[in-house]
């Protein structure tokens, strides 16, 4: 199964957006899937459902950290490479969605009762959020 399908399938089965993206790639980089799901849990819904940075983007940033960052002697240079890849991912994501901020992408603030109601009524989690998860995985696949 490819990463985009895996990510969307995980999202549709109940993982949040960050969990779905990280879980689709984590084992390739030595992170157990159950640990990845725990690590990414707080990033869903734009950071704890605060509608800030999109969870699919946060999950992608975690994948980039797994791929490019080293804890060895080259930590400083690997951080710089990771930061560069994060900026590249962000640029690519913005081309598709205009922003990396959840409430801007969705057109409503899911941290509020009214915003959450609107998102549910319009089916944004099933439509737009699954698209964001898919696109994040697709961008990652091209980058790594």
Image (cartoon, rainbow, N blue to C red):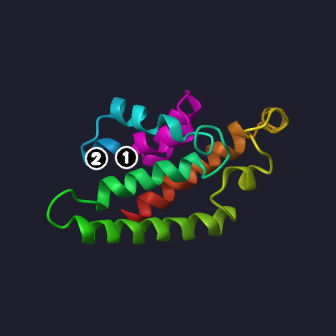
Is 85 on the left-hand or right-hand side of 73? right
- The numbered mark at residue 28 is 2
Is 125 on the left-hand or right-hand side of 6? right
Dot 1 and dot 2 residues touching (CB under 8 Å): yes
User: Is residue 1 among what the camera can see?
Assistant: no
Which of 72 and 2 lies nearest the eye of the viewer? 72
Is 15 on the left-hand or right-hand side of 108? left
Which of 5 and 109 lies nearest the eye of the viewer? 109
**Residue 47 picture location, percent across and down:** 58, 43
Determine the image quadrant of residue 73.
Answer: bottom left
**Residue 99 picture location, percent across and down:** 67, 62
Most common SS among magenta residues? helix
**Residue 63 picture location, percent across and down:** 39, 52
Dot 2 lies on which element? helix
- The numbered mark at residue 25 is 1
Magenta residues span: 1-25
């Amino acid at each position: 199964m490819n990463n985009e399908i895996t990510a969307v399938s995980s999202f549709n089965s109940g993982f949040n957006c960050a969990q779905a993206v990280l879980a689709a790639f984590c084992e390739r980089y030595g992170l157990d899937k159950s640990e990845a799901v725990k690590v990414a849990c707080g990033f869903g819904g734009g950071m704890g459902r605060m509608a800030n940075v999109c969870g699919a983007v946060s999950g992608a940033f975690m994948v980039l950290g797994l791929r490019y960052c080293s804890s060895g002697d080259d930590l400083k240079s690997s951080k710089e490479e990771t930061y560069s890849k994060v900026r590249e991912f962000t640029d690519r994501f913005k081309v598709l969605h205009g922003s990396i901020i959840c409430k801007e992408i969705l057109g409503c603030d899911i941290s509020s009762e009214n915003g959450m109601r609107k998102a549910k009524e319009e089916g944004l989690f099933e439509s737009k959020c699954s698209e964001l998860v898919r696109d994040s995985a697709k961008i990652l696949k091209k980058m790594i």
